[in-house]
Image (tube, rainbow, N blue to C red):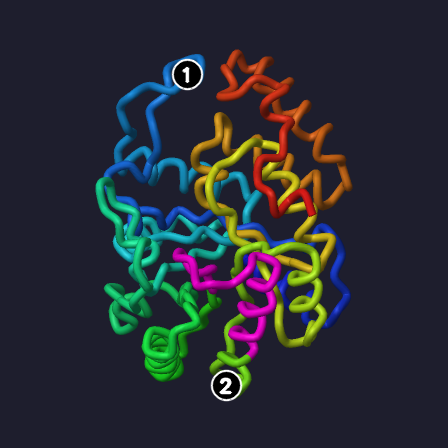
Amino acid sequence: MNKSLETKLQKIKKQIYKPKDFIIADAKDGDMAMGIVTPGPKRDSKGKILKSFKKLNDYKQAMISMSKSNLVDIMLMSASTGEELIKKKIFNNSKVTPAIRMNDTTDIWLMRNGNYRSTYPRPFRSARLKSVSKFANLGLFSMTFSKNVDFDLAMLNAYRDFRIEAIEYKFNHFLEVFNPPINIGMKSNNLGDYINDCIIKAIAGQTKEERPLFLKIAYNGPKAMEELATYDPANLIVGILGGSKGTTRDCFELIKKASHYGARVALFGRKINLAEDPILLVKLMRAVIEKDIKTIEAVKLYHSELNKKNLRPDHSLNKDLQITDPILKL
């Protein structure tokens, strides 16, 4: 079956994009970051959160269900999970493109009782292209800049080495650039400028065959998003990452604002995985983009549908209507 990702990327590059061409990825690669708690907490039959955690098989089943829905364009997974599901031919009759997280820098090490994000991020890669390329042809590579020459040099060198291998194995990738996890002595309104310049610096020396298909970055406000998205729209497609779960309004507001200022891709992990009804949430994410539904109305629709399914929402409607991420208030 033809994959929706390829078709949408071509339309975006030709600058004939329409809202229905917006790309959504379900980022189910959390086992590369969080370990045992990755699948999220168990819920009872009415959706109430319990104290115990779901198992890896539950996480895989969520990937299968979302892929069958054809609501997303990409399913991002760890190498171990991706190998299993791809070899089971889960994606053979699906419009969804499977993708593999190809590295796990230390700033995504979110294990319980750890404190890795309190220091400068270091590059690290456990997935091997030689192995992954046997069953997949798309991967995510991530970088984090810290305004420190030694650590940033290490990140850039690791990315260069990955690209050399990717060309050898004819492997496509998209590039994730995180905001630094530590205070780098920079005002928040300047951070977007810094990250944007780091991104352009990182890809300016790449030939066409090396370049990422698109970017995955944090939303650093309207100015930063619009500046990067309009810099070279025919060759540089910008996408956003989801971050923490937040409220349902946060989720809809993020995708709405980012799209308005030029993002053409959204890769959400915890926002989808920890939702009371992930498939319903993604349906409404699409409605917010494609039908221009107001985010407040989307939250109300979400709660209404949960009520019809007799599922208890994690937050009251009033609380879920709140924007809690300061960057989304700009």
Mark 1, secondary structure of its residue: loop
Using the rendered view, name the quadrant where residue 219 is placed. bottom right
> From this viewpoint, is residue 11 visible?
no
Q: Nearer the viewer, residue 242 or 23?
A: 242
Q: Residue 207 placed where, x, y %?
A: 52, 88
Using the rendered view, name the quadrant where residue 3 is placed. bottom right
Q: How many marks?
A: 2
- Does 39 appear in magenta? no
Q: Residue 324 placed where, x, y %?
A: 58, 35
Contact? badges 2 and 1 (CB < 8 Å): no
Q: Which mark is residue 206?
A: 2
Q: Which residues are magenta?
A: 177-200
As displayed, is residue 99 above or below residue 155? above
Q: Residue 185 placed where, x, y %?
A: 46, 63
Q: Give the residue pinned by disc 1.
A: 48
> From this viewpoint, is residue 70 visible?
yes
Q: Left or right: 170 with respect to 213?
A: left
Q: Residue at x 55, y 84 (%)?
A: 204
The amino acid at mark 2 is: Gln
As displayed, is residue 126 above or below residue 36? below
Q: Left or right: 207 with respect to 329?
A: left
Q: CA gap, disc 2 to disc 1?
A: 49 Å
